[in-house]
Amino acid sequence: MASRSFLFIYVLVMFSLAGMAFSDLSDDFYHHICPKALPTIKRVVEDAVRKERRMGASLLRLHFHDCFVNGCDASILLDQTSTINSEKTSRANNNSARGFEVIDKIKSEVDKVCGRPVVSCADILAVAARDSVVALHGPSWKVKLGRRDSTTASRTAANDNIPTPFMDLAALIKNFKKQGLDEEDLVALSGSHTLGFAQCFTFRNRIYNETNIDPTFRRQRQANCPRSGGDSNLAPLDPTPALFDSKYFSDLRSKKGLLHSDQALFSGGKTDDLVEKYSKNLGMFSKDFAESMIKMGDIKPLTGKRGQIRVNCRKVN
């Protein structure tokens, strides 16, 4: 009797382990299911970035804002309905998150070459983020795949979990720690601000009220961001907003961080040393950035039979 019980338990454990292995993400997930999927994503991303360089930063940001809200599950793509509280209208995304039409285009093209919807919107976001960085002369990395798409979204969770441009270092460290990310991940991933732009309302207080800011830089930014009005006026996050380089970190050392949360990384705190290293070593930053992107992509994915593969990224099946 005891041996039968042991055998039953053994079989249960083995089935559980097999399920866990099946649910793991892998970089060759679509190798046999649809080998043309990743080249198709790359082609559409490159076309979009060629038409508008800023789109690369926008697609990267979508993946970031997706993963920080209940995991990398494409919840950020869901439109508002009677049962979905869309994350698109959260404080961090409202009139700010962009690139949704590019994701729609990728989904359409990928489903066409695959013959059916087998590639999740969550995986499309992850691959598009990598391909955007590469298109802007940044590092590449092997994206783990096999995520499935959520059937829900949470504006409240987006408001609570996406880091804001007004956070100080302690708040940023706490925010990233909640996602299983450490201080090195914080600095490396903040380096994504080597790409893209920010709206005036996100840095107005910094350029008018803060003291740890270069005077010339302050005046330059004030010229396009008045004390009132012009909330959506854009300014580059670093001097080369369409090129992946280390100038973002050099700017922090010169007190030219555009956002309060940027300059917080170099303000006499525990992340100062890493900012200094990255400012002098693009290779080191690129390597750490790629590793942190992989780590971020592992945040609470839906795998196995959880979630679904959406037919339309904007709505549940």
Image (cartoon, rainbow, N blue to C red):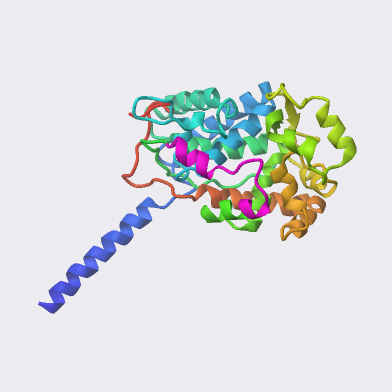
Residue lying furthest right:
216
Q: Is residue 194 left or right of residue 121?
A: right
53 versus 166 height, above or below: above
* 11 and 159: which is toward the camera: 159
The structure residue drawn at horizontal position 13% and vertical position 73%, both measured from the top left corner, is 4
Residue 36 visible in the picture: no
Is residue 158 located in the magenta-colored stretch of the structure? yes
* 71 and 308: which is toward the camera: 71
The structure residue drawn at horizontal position 78% and vertical position 25%, both measured from the top left corner, is 226
The structure residue drawn at horizontal position 69% and vertical position 25%, both measured from the top left corner, is 231
Residue 112 visible in the picture: yes
Q: Quadrant of the C terminus?
A: top left
Q: Where's residue 299, x and y in %?
A: 48, 50
Residue lying furthest bottom:
2
Q: Quadrant of residue 214?
A: top right
Q: Where's residue 270, x and y in %?
A: 72, 61
Marks counted in the figure total 0
Q: Quadrant of residue 182?
A: bottom right
Q: What's the magenta region?
A: 154-172
238 versus 181 height, above or below: above
The structure residue drawn at horizontal position 49% and vertical position 24%, both measured from the top left corner, is 104
Residue lying furthest left:
1
Q: Where's residue 217, x and y in %?
A: 86, 36
Q: Quadrant of the N terminus?
A: bottom left
Q: Where's residue 125, x and y in %?
A: 52, 36
Is residue 120 located in the magenta-colored stretch of the structure? no
